[in-house]
Image (cartoon, rainbow, N blue to C red):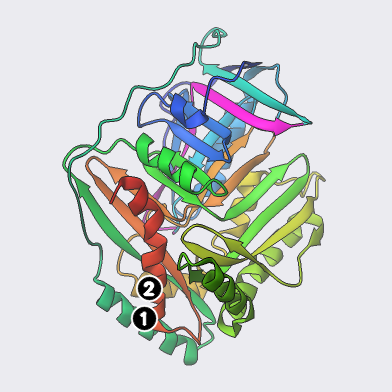
Amino acid sequence: MTSVPRVAVGVVVRSVRIDDPGPLLSLLPHSDALAWVRRGQGLVGWGSAARVDTAGRQRFAQAETWWRHVASGAVVRDEVDAPGSGLVAFGSFAFADSPGSSVLVVPEIVVGHREYAGESMWWVTTITTGALAPAPLLSPGRPTQPFRTLSYADGAMSGAAWVGRVREAVARIAGSSLEKVVLARDLLATADIEIDVRAPLQRLAASYPTCWTFHVDGLFGATPELLIRRERGLVTSRVLAGTIRRTGDDAHDLALAGALARSSKDLEEHEYATRSVAQALAPHCTSMNVPESPFVLHLPNVMHLATDVTAVLDNSAAGDASSLALAAALHPSAAVGGTPSDLAVKTIAELEGTDRGRYAGPVGWFDAAGDGEWGLALRCGAVSGSRVRLFAGCGIVAGSDPEAELAEAQAKFVPVRDALGG
């Protein structure tokens, strides 16, 4: 059921160009701020001009309906006219229909930076429910307070117990129509003080500049996987499936990359994920390009098989889907759920033994025209006071080795662990 917005809808929006105020993430005034940044470009925001929380099977549709209501009643003066200027909302959605809650937030202040139309652009957007507001003076946020201790404990189950669930998944794949299932595990980190997410966000952005560093309503991370980008009629989706851990030895890692590119198990897993994305996008697009073979994406801690699917949006009245609607059509892709989707999601609920919350759900932003970027909430943690719940998932197929999958999950915890300082 959709909740009532916290403030009256009827916002006044103004976007103006500004001089370079410094790195986007350095501007965040407090830990409740919002972020979507890659290679120093993107959006950050703070405050809440309007917000909606949704849940259940209709969570995407309810959020979309609410957003259209907000956009239709907004008075917008956009002097920038770039993707991300004007009226925007940040969002984060639950992985499962139940349990889990989802959220869209319209900030009071948004600061954007991107290279667009051949120039480097900075802007600030003010969003109010009253008169047109002047552009704020921007300065670095207050320093974060470091914690002295940080301890870790297993989440829903131990590593050994999780390996047993992977074995069960492999057995189910051998004995049913299930082809792939993504199983996740969690890890709990506890500090001696309340955790200010701004510090780990800055560390993630510095260590993983090619990933999308995000924070929405307590969920933060650096995802390598772009679920969907819609921009001026063009659609892009980056598919990741098939992973191997890096060793730190360049020559050895190059050999491992070659082995990953030839691995029948990983290529099979990747094919399921790519096919699920192409099939979900096809009804909304007039043309599509799906490369025949994946490339190897090198990250500091792991390497992935990756494919960039590109398409042209059908902009007819019947097919003009927003970026959020496209994200909803893609979710859950085989990269985070499995194949076939319904059976995989049922298997996840039976074997994982925990609520994923917004882990592996869409996270990102979109604007009043429907353009935007949504990633999958991977390599992430959910902050609550002095505790962070970290997540990692692995795609299980017929050829999966349970112990190797546990090692892969451990590698996927590394980005957030390092960002927290432990």
Q: Residue 19's mark?
A: none
- Say if 102 sits above or below 45 in the image: below
Q: Residue at x 57, y 36 (%)?
A: 40
Q: Residue at x 68, y 69 (%)?
A: 294
Q: Residue 403's mark?
A: 1
Q: Residue at x 63, y 81 (%)?
A: 262
Q: Which residues are magenta?
A: 96-116
Q: Residue 407's mark?
A: 2
Question: Quick one: 338 or 196, which is closer to the camera?
Answer: 196
Question: Quick one: 233 or 152, which is closer to the camera?
Answer: 152
The residue carrying pointer 1 sits among few (fewer than 14), some (14 to 19) or many (20 or more) residues within 10 Å by Cα, namely some
Quadrant of the image for the N terminus?
top left
Whether 12 is among the magenta residues is no
Residue extending furthest bottom?
175
Q: Amino acid at mark 1?
A: Glu
- Place residue 73 in its image quadrant: top right
The residue carrying pointer 2 sits among few (fewer than 14), some (14 to 19) or many (20 or more) residues within 10 Å by Cα, namely some
The kind of secondary structure element at disc 2 is helix
Question: Quick one: 68 or 122, which is closer to the camera?
Answer: 122
In the rendered image, residue 256, in percent from the top left (x then y), is placed at 55, 75
Real-space Cα separation, disc 2 to disc 1, in angstroms: 6 Å
Q: Are marks 2 and 1 in contact (CB under 8 Å)?
A: yes
